[in-house]
């Protein structure tokens, strides 16, 4: 005979979330990255005209953006192990949003690079 009793904690002090909440959070993060990357790529001609700079300077915006996205992936997994994946994910989402806002409000290619880069 097998025991089919549910032994998960449920009460006012426990907080259990299913795998759907994790999937929703990861999907939201991936969606934001894809949308932001698409916006940066599509906006290259408008940035050349609007910032009054050459294509080479604007290509640096895309390169710095990709570096700023890829390089932290090397050590954030360790931070997730140490401080918890939820905290690291929320902090990364906040930094990502602030950097995107800074890039959107910048008035020159150098300012755009500094807001998206390290």
Image: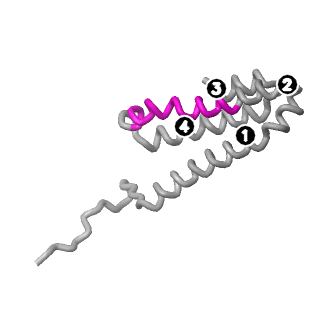
Let me know if residue 74 is in the magenta part.
Answer: yes
The alpha-carbon separation of the residues under discs 2 and 1 comes to 16 Å
Task: State which region is magenta.
Answer: 62-80
Mark 3 or mark 4: which is in front?
3
- Secondary structure at badge 2 equals loop
Mark 3 or mark 2: which is in front?
2
Within 10 angstroms of label 4, few (less than 14), some, or many (20 or more) residues?
some
Q: Is residue 8 above or below residue 80?
A: below
Within 10 angstroms of label 2, few (less than 14), some, or many (20 or more) residues?
few
Look at mark 2 in the image and give the residue it sits on: 53
Look at mark 3 in the image and give the residue it sits on: 117
Within 10 angstroms of label 1, few (less than 14), some, or many (20 or more) residues?
some
Indicate the quadrant where residue 70 lies: top right
Let me know if residue 101 is in the magenta part.
Answer: no
Q: Earlier in the sequence, mark 4 or mark 2?
A: 2
The alpha-carbon separation of the residues under discs 3 and 2 comes to 19 Å
Q: Are marks 1 and 4 in contact (CB under 8 Å)?
A: no
Front residue (pair 58, 106): 58
Q: Earlier in the sequence, mark 3 or mark 4?
A: 4
Q: Is residue 77 above or below residue 5?
A: above
Q: Main secondary structure of the magenta part?
A: helix
Relative to residue 11, is residue 57 drawn left or right? Answer: right
The alpha-carbon separation of the residues under discs 3 and 1 comes to 14 Å
- Secondary structure at badge 3 equals loop
The alpha-carbon separation of the residues under discs 1 and 4 comes to 19 Å
Mark 3 or mark 1: which is in front?
1
Look at mark 4 in the image and give the residue it sits on: 92
Q: Quadrant of the C terminus?
A: top right
Look at mark 1 in the image and give the residue it sits on: 40
Q: Earlier in the sequence, mark 3 or mark 2?
A: 2
């Amino acid at each position: 005979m097998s025991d089919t009793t549910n032994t998960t904690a449920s009460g006012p002090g426990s907080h259990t979330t299913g795998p759907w909440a994790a999937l929703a959070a990861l999907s939201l993060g991936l969606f934001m990255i894809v949308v932001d990357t698409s916006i940066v790529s599509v906006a290259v001609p408008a940035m050349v005209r609007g910032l009054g700079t050459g294509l080479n300077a604007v290509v640096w915006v895309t390169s710095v953006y990709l570096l700023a996205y890829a390089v932290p992936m090397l050590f954030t997994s360790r931070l997730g192990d140490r401080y918890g994946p939820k905290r690291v994910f929320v902090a990364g989402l906040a930094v990502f949003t602030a950097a995107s806002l800074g890039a959107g409000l910048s008035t020159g290619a150098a300012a755009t690079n500094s807001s998206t880069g390290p």
